[in-house]
Image (cartoon, rainbow, N blue to C red):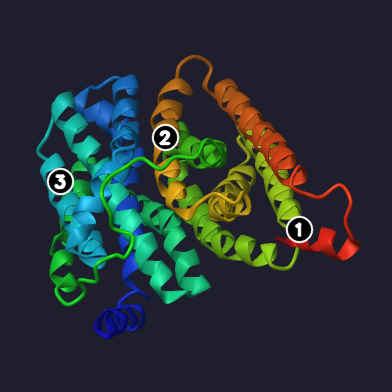
């Protein structure tokens, strides 16, 4: 028992502070670099835009397998699994540079989605060992860091083949996990823990992030500057919004964030004002850092949050495909309206019905903060 405690302490001190941030960021890079490939893929491989957006979104279907594959795979050790997933993703990225058939890329992207699920689940669990809010916040902020890396690489290399080959630099990641093989106390037999409430929270809350998948194809070359500026600000939002929850009521922060997302998103897709997409990106991604907090406020068992979140990833596949069929900007505006209003109504109903009808002002204030 003492050895286990010592191992966990060692991991928390000399491994967790960097590893989960690295893993989440690199996993996101492999998942989302394809967002910058769309126009290049259409030009070089002559795929249709629909086929290209299917390839963009299919990893999110693979991610839905995470609740079933993560427990048995995590038996090798959570930090080991995190870095092993990155190494395999790097190998697949390298092989994708030599693939030119839709079915080949489809399979590769699907497997990347499975590995993204195992890598990020392990990263989040590893970061939790530290009990450090900054580390946990930056781990979740790995989505923005990974997107930034993809934007910068494609901006300089200008080819999806070269960016895919460049991903091989992360191939040696697994060798750094040799001494870090803590077995997760959460590992158990595969079974389905699911909460419809958490599913709704992440389905609605992740909508801005999934809409952002199509922005590089929508903006063209302008997307590089937008991504670098917006995602840099988003990293700050990942840290700032959870901190503000501790100083103000959770509902005020959620409602304010939803209002900013709604207004900036609609204004951008009506006017193409770059300032609006920067704001939409920063707050749309910042909302992601609030979703675990919202889930906990709903008194949902912790083991149900991960699987429910992974199943909600189906919208990461559906949105890029559906929104690009027909009048794109109108479809996106409708999606922003429905998701923002839907989240507002859901939070208002769930949070307010938990407040006592008769209670002291002190108790009422406690519940609002809680």
- Observer-nearest of 232 and 112: 112
> Which residue is at 26% across, 64% downward?
78
Q: CA distance from mark 1 to mark 3?
A: 48 Å
Residue 336 in view, yes or no: yes
**With 123 as the anchor, is 139 left or right in this view?**
right
Residue at x-position 11% and y-position 34%: 99
Of the numbered discs in the image, which one, if any, rests on residue 316? 2
Find residue 264 and report its image quarter: top right
Disc 1 marks which residue? 367
Above-or-below relation of 330 to 63: above
What count of labels does the image hold? Answer: 3
Towards the viewer: 209 or 201? 201
> Where residue 2 appears, x then y in whole percent?
28, 85
Question: 346 or 324: which is nearer to us?
Answer: 346
The image quarter containing residue 314 is top left
**1 vs 3, front mark:** 1
Q: Secondary structure at mark 3?
A: helix
> Which badge, 3 or 2, comes first in the chain's sequence?
3
Measuring 62% from the left and 49% from the top, which residue is drawn there?
298
- Residue 186 locus on image (x, y percent): 33, 60
Image quadrant containing the N terminus = bottom left
* Disc assigned to residue 92: 3
């Amino acid at each position: 028992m003492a050895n286990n405690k010592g191992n966990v302490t060692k991991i928390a001190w000399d491994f967790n502070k960097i590893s989960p941030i690295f893993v989440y960021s690199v996993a996101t890079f492999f998942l989302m670099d394809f967002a910058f490939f769309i126009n290049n893929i259409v030009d070089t491989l002559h795929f249709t835009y629909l086929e290209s957006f299917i390839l963009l979104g299919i990893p999110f279907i693979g991610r839905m397998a995470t609740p079933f594959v993560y427990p048995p795979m995590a038996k090798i050790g959570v930090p080991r699994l995190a870095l092993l997933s990155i190494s395999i993703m790097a190998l697949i990225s390298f092989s994708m540079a030599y693939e030119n058939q839709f079915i080949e890329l489809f399979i590769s992207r699907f497997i990347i989605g499975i590995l993204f699920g195992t890598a990020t689940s392990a990263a989040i669990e590893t970061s939790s060992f530290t009990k450090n809010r900054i580390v946990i916040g930056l781990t979740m902020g790995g989505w923005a860091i990974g997107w930034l890396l993809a934007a910068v690489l494609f901006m300089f290399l200008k080819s999806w083949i070269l960016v895919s080959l460049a991903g091989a630099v992360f191939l040696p990641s697994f060798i750094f996990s040799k001494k870090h093989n803590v077995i997760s106390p959460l590992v158990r037999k595969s079974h389905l823990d699911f909460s419809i409430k958490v599913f709704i929270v992440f389905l609605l809350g992740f909508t801005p992030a999934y809409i952002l998948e199509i922005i590089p194809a929508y903006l063209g070359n302008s997307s590089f500057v937008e991504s670098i500026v917006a995602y840099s600000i988003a990293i700050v939002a990942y840290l700032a919004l959870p901190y503000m929850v501790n100083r103000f009521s959770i509902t005020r922060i959620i409602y304010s964030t939803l209002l900013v997302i709604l207004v900036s998103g609609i204004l951008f897709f009506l006017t193409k004002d770059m300032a609006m997409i920067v704001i939409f990106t920063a707050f749309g991604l910042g909302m992601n850092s609030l979703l675990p907090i919202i889930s906990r406020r709903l008194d949902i068992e912790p083991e149900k949050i991960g699987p429910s979140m992974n199943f909600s990833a189906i919208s990461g596949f559906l949105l890029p495909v559906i929104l690009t069929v027909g009048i794109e900007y109108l479809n996106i505006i409708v999606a922003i309206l429905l998701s923002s209003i839907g989240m507002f109504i859901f939070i208002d109903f769930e949070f307010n019905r938990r407040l006592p009808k008769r209670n002291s002002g002190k108790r009422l204030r406690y519940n609002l903060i809680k």
